[in-house]
Amino acid sequence: ILMAKADMDTLQLACIQVAIALLLLTQAKSTTEDTSALHPNGTITSCIAGERSALLAFRAGLSDPGNILSSWKGDDCCRWKGVYCSNRTGHVVKLDLGGPDHYGGCDEGRQMLAGNISSSLLGLQHLRYLDLHCNGFDKIQIPEFIGSLHQLRYLDLSSLLFIGKIPPQLGNLSNLQYLNLDNSYICPFCTYSKDITWLSRLTSLEQLDMTYVNLSTIVHWVPVVNMLPTLKVLRLPFCELGSSPDSLLLSNLTSLETLDLSENNFHKSSRPNWFWDVSSLKHLNISANDFYGLFPDEIGNMTSIVELGLSNNNFVGMIPSSMKNLCNLELLGFPFNNINGSIQELFNRLPSCSQNKLQWLDASNCSLTGSLPTTPVDSIINLSHLQLRNNRLGGHVPVWLGELTNLAMLDLSSNNLDGVMHEGHFSRLEKLYTLDLSDNSIAITVSPTWVPPFSLREIYLRSCQLGPKFPVWLRWQKQVRALDISNTSINDMVPDWLWFAASSAGFLNLRDNQIKGVLPSTMEFMHAQEMDFSSNQLGGPIPKLPLNLIGLDLSRNNIVGPLPSDFGAPWLETLVLYDNMISGGIPSSLCKLRSLQLLDLSGNNLNGSITDCVVNESGTDMTSLSIINLSFRNNSLSGEFPSLLQKCPQLIFLDLGLNQFSGALPAWIGEKLLSLSFLRLRSNMFYGHIPVKLTKLVNLQYLDLAYNNISGSIPRSIGNCTGMRQARGNSDNLRYALNTFFQLGENKLVDYTENLTVLMKGQERLYTGEIIYMVNLDLSCNSLTGEIPEEISTLIELKNLNLSWNSFNGKIPENVGALMQVESLDLSHNDLSGEIPSSLSALTSLSRLNLSYNNLKGKIPAGNQLQTLEDPTSIYIGNPGLCGPPLSQNCSSKPEQIPGEYHGVAIDDVVSFFLALGSGFVMGLWVVFCTFLFKRRWRAAWYSLCDSLYDWVYVQVAVTWTSLRGKNNG
Ligand SMILES: *[C@@H]1O[C@H](CO)[C@@H](O)[C@H](O)[C@H]1NC(C)=O
Ligand SMILES: *[C@@H]1O[C@H](CO)[C@@H](O)[C@H](O)[C@H]1NC(C)=O
Ligand SMILES: *[C@@H]1O[C@H](CO)[C@@H](O)[C@H](O)[C@H]1NC(C)=O
């Protein structure tokens, strides 16, 4: 400019020069002023004082046990962790304090921020990005003031402990593009909204996630989201939504690509539905909504669709043939619907495009029929993931499956597939990761020298035919995480290499085979968390266990030797060793298993008394154990009722039956074992009274003291046992205590159901998981005396009441008919007198009744169930005072009697009966009476004999009397 104005006079020139100089000077000055905030690369990052104090006030409201905000000191708040300032203005624009993520949830093990969210955040008015997810803030409502942070573009409040109403003030955030209120991980359904019209004001919104926010009262939610024309991602799973309109007349949702409406309650016909018409959709998930009707043809119009999730609905019939057009489809899942059609037809309707993209197909639990096609199908040739479990597929597995080179997961479990699979079926499955063929009749027959092309991580072959030789190909599977070869007809020695090949497996199931050999001494170097070797022929002692082991089932083997003095698995929760030949005492090493919840040592040769474990290694008193379910049944253990159990406050199930325990029942059972629900002490030598405190156990629903020498009377407070008055078999606690399942994927690992025999209805009955529904009071074969307390008739959930073979006297409780659930009632062999209460005929569930051998008199009540019981006379036998049907005695006058006869009892039995009777007199009468209960035929013999004797005497008397009268009359 200056050169162009060369003709200007010098004054003008000077003026301009001065002006320019001044201008430059000011610029220079302002630059110098900002230099303090300049980083070498020339950006401004120093923080603004007001915002710094806002951040400090925000921090003051928090507690920070993990010291996450340790960098929040010094002047420059822009360098603090999680704080980001604008390069241009210096304002704090981003606060990223999201907690640690872990597989889509929050990693609770790691430290989080807690405390309160201070409204001082309002000092950050330029905030565009706020992420607080996965922290442990106090349970509060989402603060309303967040709606005043008008610049916010991004707001992530997911997985926090927010509760209550979502503030409609959030609708003021008109710049918001991303809003995440997902509650799923930390506090499902803790927040709600009863009116979501505020959402419609978020006109810039692109992504919305309200997973697990309770929106159950909202009917017209679709018109609201339809006001958001820029919406791309909408996630509303688990929102209790109940309505979904058939169509949107004018759809604004032209950008919508992802729609997740899974796990709501729409319960409506599959069509029409508005979302089938949203042609921009790439990802649609409507799983678990109870949609019913045919798979809609409209699916074929969704040409952009990439992922389609339709599982857990009631779609019926074949998928529409229009799906052939879905050339972008990569993932298709519709398990748990009812296709009820042929698998070949299904394959023919899958997309068949020039370039086949389908990678993932899950058609499990769909009632698919027919057999897999014998020639390759184009539509599935690129699959990496094929799940067809739990259908009705039959026939052979075709060899061409071995050509699916991308296949990583093949699940054909729980079908009716049969035939042989050989090397060819796996020839090119180099990428195979998971193979699940469980529960078919498939035989896998390969050469012992075969080296598979794959290195599997998960192998599930339960109930396939692999044996009788141990499958050698497993030797090459060295990265296995889960191996299930249970019930595979293996009848062989366990090979040494197994313990190396499977050493990295977390889950190992070999149960139900005939595997022989011993557990290796190197077992402690394995990585298993769960091992199930039950029902085999493994011998030898129990070695030191893998460090990480949580569950071990060795039941029904030939394990010998003592229990280890060091289990080596400090986190063990389940230890199931029943039906082996383990001998020796109960070692104190058991007391070190502080996490142990289930211990079943029943059916072994253990002896001695149970150690006290009062003192641990360091000599200090130990705290309590975690045990919930404990069974020592059927060993030779002795000593008093184990005082160790005082340290087991969580005990729910205790079985000491069939041992030689003796002494009195301690009163502390009722004080220390407050969760106890099942107590089985049958067949021991306990004596003394039933402690009154035992009736403090409100959860007690199963009390079996039979075959001991308990004396005294039944405490009247027995009525306090709420567990016998209220059904609680469904309680999760009980389920957990008695059925401990470890699961890896859907494959059961240690499937332990308490096997318990209950002597009921006169025969041994094996209760498995059903035991939790059993309500039982069995005091039979003791020396109890006194009256049966009337309170017993308040225990209305009782299914079995057995007080037989005692010395109870007095009357049968008048209100016994209140025990409506009772299936078996045995009061026989006591000294009960008086009449049978007529309420007895109200017992409609009754299938076994025994009142024999008492002193009951009067008329037998009639009606209902009593009429249908088997062998009616034996119920009342041995009560000479009873009369009326089913007995032949008439209540008004004595009728004629026909002498009884021996009811087909073999002479052997009569002889052994008399032998038993003889020894019985020596041993004490009750012993033989109990023997009778063991031996049904003896018992029958005894009854018949007594019948016959009685009848014979009666007839003799009657005949003599008649003849005397006849003589007199004559
Ligand atoms: C500027 O410098 C700061 C601090 O040295 C650094 O953290 C930042 O990444 C730099 N920015 C650019 C754009 O290089
Ligand atoms: C601010 O700096 C960051 C890096 O520190 C850079 O990525 C970003 O593009 C910069 N923003 C502007 C507006 O210059
Ligand atoms: C579409 O969105 C705009 C802007 O939010 C709104 O005004 C209009 O009512 C919407 N249309 C329908 C049919 O809801």
Image: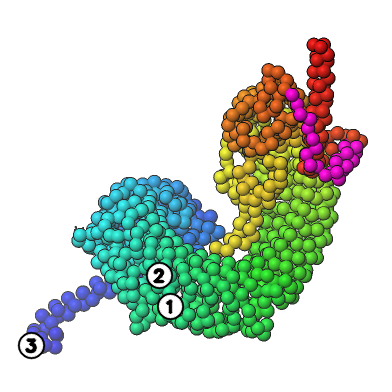
Tell which of 467 and 211 is nearer to you.
467
User: Closer to the N terminus: mark 1 or mark 2?
Assistant: 2
Tell which of 36 and 599 is nearer to you.
599
Amino acid beneath label 1: Ile
Q: Nearer the viewer, mark 3 or mark 1?
A: 1
Amino acid beneath label 2: Leu
Please identify the quadrant where the N terminus is shown. Answer: bottom left
Q: Is residue 725 left or right of residue 625?
A: left
The colour scheme applied to this rendered structure is: rainbow
Question: Element type at marker 2?
Answer: strand
Q: Nearer the viewer, mark 2 or mark 3?
A: 2
Q: CA distance from mark 2 to mark 3?
A: 82 Å
Residue at 53% x, 76% y is 397
Q: Is residue 167 left or right of residue 411?
A: left
Q: Which residue is mark 2?
A: 332
Please identify the quadrant where the C terminus is shown. Answer: top right
User: Closer to the N terminus: mark 3 or mark 1?
Assistant: 3
